[in-house]
Amino acid sequence: MDVNLLGIFVTVAIAHFLALLSPGPDFVLVVKSAIRNEGKNAIGVALGIASANALYVGLCLIGVGTILAASVTIMIVLKVIGGLFLIYLAVQALRASKGSYNNLDMAEHTHSNAVKATFLKEFITGFMSGILNPKNLLFYLSLFTVVLTPEVGFAFKLGLGIWMTAIVFLWDLSIIFLLSTPKVRSKFTKLAYYIDKVTGAILGLIGFAIVKSALTKQ
């Protein structure tokens, strides 16, 4: 790898990781899933989010991302659907009764599934959250058009896309692992009801802001 490509890699890697550190709906979903589910099921959300990111990377690689981003109608529809999806998740969290959180402690209720979801359901939730977030498309599109110019080879772009997808998955996986450790989980599960309400409210506000932004900019 020559010096120019190494510089591009470092620049993109840092920008991408800093974007991951900024809490958004995906981060909130990972925290919610880690608190509410067993580790193996919560991984479904991480894999779903990473898959959505991989899809957007792929679209940018073949040039479809540019077409999507250029269509005002498509971006508005994506924003509205994405916002409504987050509002739906928020309503689900806010409607849950306090009693449904009594069996979250894995140490004492390893077979309880009162509020736990399946791996597939968590995967779909994560994928929908990632794919319906226009910011993901615009972020990757900006990287692939501004930083990764046509002079940069396809193989390098593909490798960088795989790297970014892997980092998204590993970052979410690390959050799940942290919240799955007995000591940390024990503290969080005692506050699970309140955490779910707060994260649900945050998702709802983000969803409302996205829908409002999409409709007022028509």
Image (tube, rainbow, N blue to C red):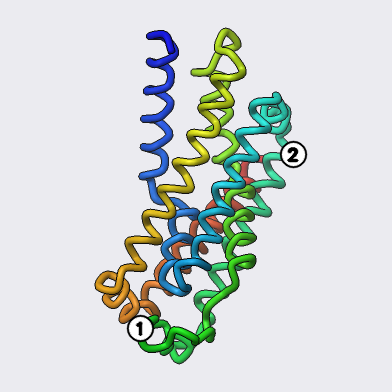
Q: Residue at x 34, y 65 (%)?
A: 179
Q: Is residue 83 above or below residue 116?
A: above
Type of residue at label 2? Thr
Type of residue at label 1? Ala
Q: Locate residue 17, reporting x and y percent.
A: 38, 37
Outermost bottom residue: 99
Question: What residue is shown with label 1?
Answer: 107
Q: Is residue 125 visible?
A: yes
Q: Locate residue 56, reporting x and y percent.
A: 63, 37
Q: Locate residue 119, reporting x and y percent.
A: 59, 67
Q: Is residue 52 above or below residue 108?
A: above
Provide the secondary structure element on which disc 2 rests: helix
| Quadrant holding the N terminus | top left
Q: Residue at x 50, y 60 (%)?
A: 43
Left or right of 213 in this view: 100? left
State the image quarter where residue 185 is shown.
bottom left
Question: What residue is shown with label 2?
Answer: 73
| Quadrant holding the C terminus | top right
Q: Is residue 90 above or below residue 102?
A: above
The mark closer to the camera, 2 or 1, is 1
Left or right of 80 in this view: 47? left
